[in-house]
Image: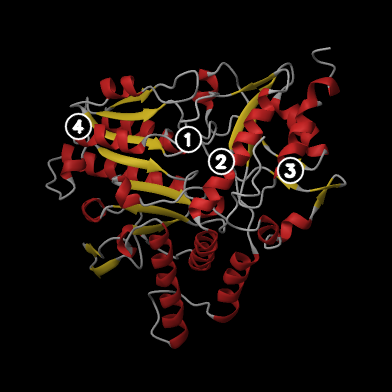
Amino acid sequence: MSSLAETAAYDVRAVRADFPILGETVNGHPLIYLDSAATSQKPFVVLDAERMFLEHANAAVHRGAHTLAAEATDTFEDARADVARFVGAAPENIVWTSGATAALNLVAYSIGNVSVGAAHGADAAASPYALHPGDEIVVTEAEHHANLIPWQQLAARTSAVLRHIPVHDDGTLDLDAAADLIGERTRIVAFSHVSNVLGIVNPVAHLVALAKDAGALTVLDACQSAPHLALDLPALGVDLAAFSGHKMLGPYGIGVLYGRSEVLDALPPVLTGGSMVTTVTLDHAEFLPAPQKFEAGTQPVSQAVGLAAAVQYLAGLGMDAVHARERLLERRLRDGLREIPGIRLLGDTADPSVERIGLCAFEVDGVHAHDAGQVLDDHGIAVRVGHHCAQPLHRRFGMTASVRASTSVFTTEAEIDTLLDAVSGVRSFFGVGR
């Protein structure tokens, strides 16, 4: 197995000291946290940033004229600028949401409202994004439910047709099928940057090119790429993208919708109320420009401050270094799992050109995923078990649930080896395969 000693650009021991929860024990064992794809742990700088804001600068943003309110507003907007910089964007391209699910639903409902208006003859600036009966929305077979169900609902509302790009047995997308599917009736192409089950980095440039040739809008689920890859969303060419704070060392309750300015300017708001208007009469309202027009009501201010601290922390490590280290951890994990009898990896391939993040999902022959997870938990190892909000993909591989191990910036080689040792004993623990 490859050693990380010469490839790590940061000291993982120093990084581990930044995460207070890693000092905990579970069932008498030191905690080994391999569930970062579900939710990440938070370093001191994130916890401190949120607490310090609440202790010293807490006030309503964009609403008060007093000094504290002005300071809070500046801090809030500085956080937007920090997060924008992290993904290569401008602040006006960043919309705060409560999470990636909310961001993706915002887009789907906004397009749905445009479509309903167009059906009734409304002359809206967003009319190019309206869906009509028979128009097509293309997703992939590997999507998280948050990037599938909103499009199912939108198709049902507009009488559009939902189509999907299949995956090969090795988990890679069938790009020949994608070329056939994405055509003159395609209006939206929505896909994940990285599969939350397979860990595979999808060919964004290829899919964006197909969508652009068809004149379709591209929507990227970047939840599993933002914590692990250097991101430049404008350079990727996507029209819209979503990611969540809690998966990238940040707080809960904060997410981001990135959008190209012309797209955000054209789409109408979904939630309405205070803080997103210019003029309101009893009969009419005029809205602020993007991103504020999408940010009605009370904002997740301390959470935004915490997320800004998280992206600064990641940037300080260097995202290229983060990915390089986690890529080697993934190989160590995947190679080790291949050697254990009775383990079936989802979407496995020995092709080194397939890029992945540090994530593997697998099935233990003869043992339900939840039972396998319990054995690992008895060893202090936290993994995810279930369908990972990706039932169609599991069904594609003929299973209902799997065990998923996912790494983060603090994961060590020794932790991977401890996991592999524990997994190797699962079947014998249940008397399977003797």
The location of residue 238, given as percent across then percent down, is 30, 44
Q: Amino acid at mark 2?
A: Arg
The location of residue 274, given as percent across then percent down, is 36, 66
Residue 214 disc label:
4
In percent of the image, x 42 and y 39: which residue is there? 193
Q: Tell me: residue 347, above or below residue 276.
A: above
Q: Where, quadrant-wise, is the C terminus in this rendering?
A: top right
Q: With 418 as the anchor, is 169 left or right in this view?
A: left
Q: Tell me: residue 27, above or below residue 173.
A: below
Tag count in the figure?
4
In percent of the image, x 36 and y 55: which residue is there? 271
Residue 355 disc label:
1
Upstream in sequence: badge 1 or badge 2? 2
Upstream in sequence: badge 2 or badge 4? 4
Taking depth in this image into account, of 430 and 355 the one nearest to the observer is: 355
Q: CA distance from mark 1 to mark 4?
A: 27 Å
Element at label 4? helix
Upstream in sequence: badge 3 or badge 4? 4
Element at label 2? helix
Name the residue tied to disc 3: 415
| Residue lying furthest front | 6
Upstream in sequence: badge 2 or badge 3? 2
Q: CA distance from mark 3 to mark 1?
A: 22 Å
Number of residues whose C-alpha sits closer than 10 Å to that of mark 3, classed few (under 14), some (14–19) or many (20 or more): some
Taking depth in this image into account, of 326 and 281 the one nearest to the observer is: 326
